[in-house]
Amino acid sequence: MEEHNIVLDEDIIVGNHSDIRYGIIADSVIIGERVSVSGDVLARSDIRIDIWSKIGGNVRCGENGYIGEFVNIDGKLFVNGDLDVGNDVKINRGFEAHGWIVVRNPVPVITYIFLYISELLRMGKGEEVEKAMSEFFEEEAKEISYGAMVVPNGSRISADSIRVPGAATIGDNCRLVGNIRAESLEMGDATTLYGSIRTASDIEIGENNAIHGNIVSRGRVVVGKGTHILGEINAYSIRIHEDSRVDGVMRATGGTTFIREEEEVARDRELIKLDIADQPQ
């Protein structure tokens, strides 16, 4: 997360009714219904923007663009490939497209799937429905890379906060800005967060992370090796690696447990066995 943009090496999928107070730079961009993006949207491949969404800046895509009905783009639209555009789309500063331009409303993927399955069920082809669904989701799993960013429906991302209505999962080597508010959180390794974390359920933090804020949870908090918490930890229970660091106070009504290296634990057990063996019978 830069000062004005969310930058990804791979893809981003933004769920319906989300509010993104940044620009977006990614490989491919899929934006759902009634989504607000404050800045520019730049995709190195395709862009799909669903109905009633609003983009506060320019939109650029390296390949094809699909713009649904009633989309409002405050800036200019640049498309290197083909452009499918719906009715009543407002592009305040005009557009450029190097390929074919078709004025039609692109059918949202989920609507297409629903209509297709409904027709198969009406024809009594239940086995074909199961086969089509397995093939479709297998193909989708290949197309959507592991490193994609998925923003759940109804989320809000700004410089102040990152709010999601359910669980939040953060990968490795990320740089995030904002206070995270979620139902639960799982963080990978080598990630830096400039903000606090507050959840109703569990928090699991991997190794070598840096959290520039407090951690508050009504569940358990697990902190991996080499992680640095610059604030406090308040939770029901805490499990923290002995090589991690917490600058503030740790409070846990259910107790605090320090995690040790497996090799050290095994060595201590062997020493205890030797001590017991040396004792006189």
Image: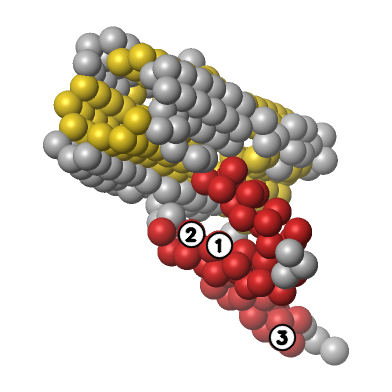
- Give the position of the N terminus as an image quadrant: top left
Can residue 268 be seen here? The reply is no
Q: Secondary structure at mark 1?
A: helix
Q: Quadrant of residue 184?
A: top right
In the depicted structure, whether residue 254 falls above or below residue 242: above
Numbered circles on residues, count: 3
Left or right of 123, for residue 2: left
Q: Is residue 111 visible?
A: yes
Q: Are marks 3 and 2 in contact (CB under 8 Å)?
A: no
Residue sitting at 54 percent across and 28 percent down? 33
- Residue labelled with disc 2: 140
Where does residue 225 sit, x and y in percent of width and height? 50, 52
Query: Considering depth in this image, is 100 or 262 the residue closer to the camera?
Result: 100
Residue 124 appears left or right of 136: right
From what the image shows, is residue 139 above or below residue 32? below
**Disc 3 residue crowd, few under 14, some 14–19, many 20+, Cα 10 Å:** few
Whether residues under marks 2 and 1 lie with C-beta atoms below 8 angstroms apart, the answer is yes
Mark earlier in primary sequence (1, 3) = 1
Q: Which one is closest to the eye, mark 1 or mark 3?
A: 1
**Label 3 vs 2, first from the N-terminus:** 2
Q: What whole-number distance in Å separates the C-alpha atoms at marks 2 and 1? A: 5 Å
* Residue located 26% across and 14% down the image: 75
Q: Which quadrant of the figure has residue 90?
A: top left
Tell me which residue sits at (71%, 42%) in the image: 202
The circle drawn on residue 137 is: 1
Q: Nearer the viewer, residue 264 or 171?
A: 171
Q: Residues within 10 Å of mark 1 (few under 14, many from 20)?
A: few
Image point (48%, 59%), residue name: 140
Q: Which residue is mark 3?
A: 278
What residue type is disc 1 on? Phe
